[in-house]
Amino acid sequence: MLKLYYHPTPNSMKVAVLLEELDLPYEVATIDIMKGEQHAPAFRKVNPNAKVPAIVDDGVTVFDSHAILLYLAEKHDKFLPLEIEARAATFSWLEFVASGLSPFSGQAAHFLHYAPEDIPYAKNRYIREVERHYRVLDERLSVAKFLAGKDYTIADIALFGWAASAGFIFGEKGLGDYPHVARFVEDMNARPAVVRALQLKATYAFKSELDEQAKRSMFPQNFAA
């Protein structure tokens, strides 16, 4: 059975949604990143980069959320269009999330919630870039139901991972400035597979206190060896 190494992060959510959409049986192996379980030697054998998610599928190990999305979509021939134009659009928007929205959202969240000191320049830099990416996405979703057009693809699943938690960056207004992205998230939340994936967070217990152990576990590069 496929094993999903999971912590309730936006990147793990992407993979959980796809597994549910594919209706695949899978086992969840929780990795509590605030306890430092991602640095355990056993998990480092699965992902040398010590990050979630990762999967082991019939002896095949795949890490990085977008690599997993591509691997599963190709293996099961779903959510990756065959028509060349739609396939190209899927790849383009998938990488837009991978190289833009995802890292900038991560950095914005870091400087808003985890940095030990207030750095206005860093917060402004990353929040503005997140906003810019959402403006691009909002424009796209104003003329298309899904990122690749009419087809629901892994690009949409990748976007949902971050868009579903946009309030962590934007606060109470959430996606209010991006009505078409908000519509997209509402549509996604109505999908049974997404509902099941979201339930994983409530199924398993994880450390929530951002104490010294959590800081050292999540950001070891900030501390001397």
Image (cartoon, rainbow, N blue to C red):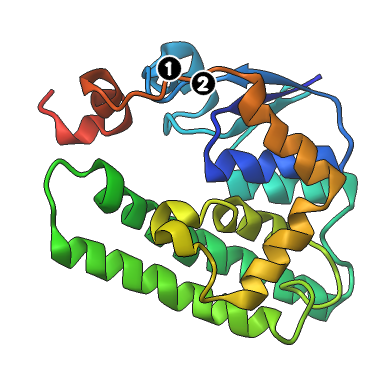
- Residue at image mark 2: 31
Task: Name which residue type carries label 1.
Answer: Glu
For label 1, the SS is helix
Task: Name which residue type carries label 2.
Answer: Ile
**Residue placed most toward the observer, 210 or 147:** 210
Q: Position of residue 113 (x, y in %)?
A: 29, 45
Q: What crowding class fits label 1: few (fewer than 14 Cα within 10 Å), some (14-19), or many (20 or more)?
A: some
Residue 208 against residue 221 in the figure, above or below: above
Q: Is residue 187 left or right of residue 132?
A: right
Residue 131 against residue 76 in the figure, above or below: below
Q: Is residue 64 visible?
A: no
Q: Position of residue 19 (x, y in %)?
A: 78, 38
* Image point (80%, 81%), residue name: 85
**Residue placed most toward the observer, 72 or 171:** 171
Q: Quadrant of the C terminus?
A: top left
- Residue at image mark 1: 37
* Image point (33%, 66%), residue name: 127
* Image point (61%, 85%), residue name: 139
**Residue placed most toward the observer, 28 or 197:** 197
Which residue is situated farthest in the front direction here? 172
Q: How many marks?
A: 2
Marks 2/1: CA–CA distance: 6 Å
Q: Position of residue 83 (x, y in %)?
A: 89, 74
Identify the image quadrant of residue 60: top right
Tell me, yes or no, whether the two marked residues, 2 and 1, touch with CB atoms within 8 Å: yes
* Image point (51%, 76%), residue name: 177
Q: Is residue 178 visible?
A: yes
Q: Position of residue 158 (x, y in %)?
A: 64, 56
Residue 142 against residue 92 in the figure, above or below: below
* Label 2 vs 1, first from the N-terminus: 2
